[in-house]
Image: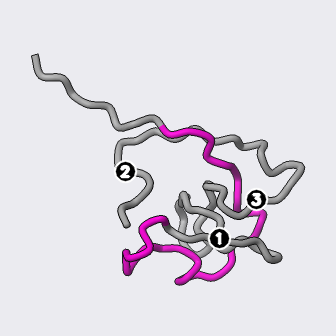
Amino acid sequence: MEPGLLDGQVVFVDRRAYLTRPPADGDIVVAHHPQRDFEIIKRVEFVDEGVYLRSDNRNEPDAQDSRSFGLVGLENVWGRVTSVVPKSRTVAT
């Protein structure tokens, strides 16, 4: 399976989405990586006191998702992806 997002695409994130409710199964979220200092964009597989995040590219052996680092605390999930802008194309003149 190919990744859901490609380098160069722009995502819009609702940072207020989880102020009144937890993430839901299937949501695409932005979260802080629990073991490294960067943000990740992953799909919520399930919520159980924490969030289990999976890469859409499940065949990627180094996908950096909950298979390698476990549940992500709800405090580390800071937004829901609401839309994706396709990668811009350069037009030759």
* Residue at figure coordinates x 18%, y 23% from the top left: 91
Mark 3 is on which residue type? Answer: Pro
Residue identified by numbered label 2? 6
Residue carrying label 1: 45
Part of the protein shown in magenta: 56-84
Q: Earlier in the sequence, mark 1 or mark 2?
A: 2
Q: Is residue 6 left or right of residue 64?
A: left
Percent of width and height locating residue 32: 62, 62
Disc number placed over residue 31 in the picture, else none: none
Ranked by sequence position, the earlier of labels 1 and 3 is: 3
| Quadrant for the C terminus in the image | top left
| Disc 1 to disc 2: CB gap under 8 Å | no
Mark 1 lies on a secondary structure that is strand
* Mark 2 residue crowding within 10 angstroms, few (<14) / some (14–19) / many (20+): few
Q: Pick whichever, 57 or 18, lies toward us.
A: 57
The spot of residue 38 in percent (x, y) is 53, 61
On the image, the x and y values in percent for residue 67 come to 55, 83
Please give left or right for residue 18 compared with residue 61 in the image: right
Q: Is residue 17 above or below residue 35?
A: above
Give x and y (percent) for residue 3: 40, 60
Q: Quadrant of residue 88?
A: top left
Whole-number angstrom distance, CA of label 2 to CA of label 3? 23 Å
